[in-house]
Amino acid sequence: MERNFFEKEVDRIATLAYLKLSSEERKEMIHHFEKMYKLVSILKEMEIDNVPMLIYPHEGAKLPLFDDIPEKGLELIDVIQNAPDSFKEYIRSQSPIKEAKLKE
């Protein structure tokens, strides 16, 4: 593929994306396009006719599974005592809605 093609493509994409590229950035993008083209060209040469399609990358992998063993959790009184603010058996916290409005 000739370099002129990559230059035109970089210019076209920059125009579509409303980007103003400096001459150095333009050269760098052209270089990246050339590298991507070389990679795809190598991949196109590979023989993949007899390779089964993989739907999930972990298909057939042996994942370690652990038994779910129920355990006794903390007592409610201990949780409430460790909370910074509480009301009866509930833990009070700041409103996330108020915090989100403050950030806007």
Image (spheres, grey):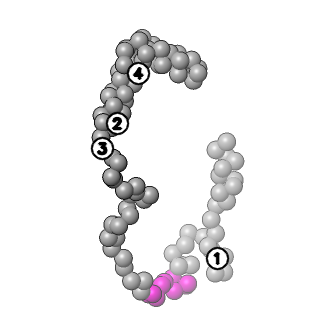
| SS label for mark 1 | strand
Alpha carbon separation for disc pair 1 and 2: 61 Å
Alpha carbon separation for disc pair 4 and 1: 56 Å
**What range of the chain is rendered magenta?**
70-78
Q: Quadrant of the N terminus?
A: top left
Q: Position of residue 23 (x, y in %)?
A: 42, 11
Residue 18's tag is none
Residue where numbered disc 2 is placed: 44
Alpha carbon separation for disc pair 4 and 2: 22 Å
Residue where numbered disc 1 is placed: 90
Q: Residue at x 64, y 76 (%)?
A: 90
Badge nearest the viewer, 1 or 3: 3
Q: Position of residue 85 (x, y in %)?
A: 60, 70
Q: Residue at x 37, y 62 (%)?
A: 58
Residue 29's tag is 4
Q: Amino acid at mark 2?
A: Lys
Q: Residue at x 56, y 69 (%)?
A: 84
Disc with the residue nearer the chain's start (4 vs 1)? 4
Q: Position of residue 82 (x, y in %)?
A: 51, 75
For residue 27, above or below residue 92? above
Alpha carbon separation for disc pair 3 and 4: 30 Å
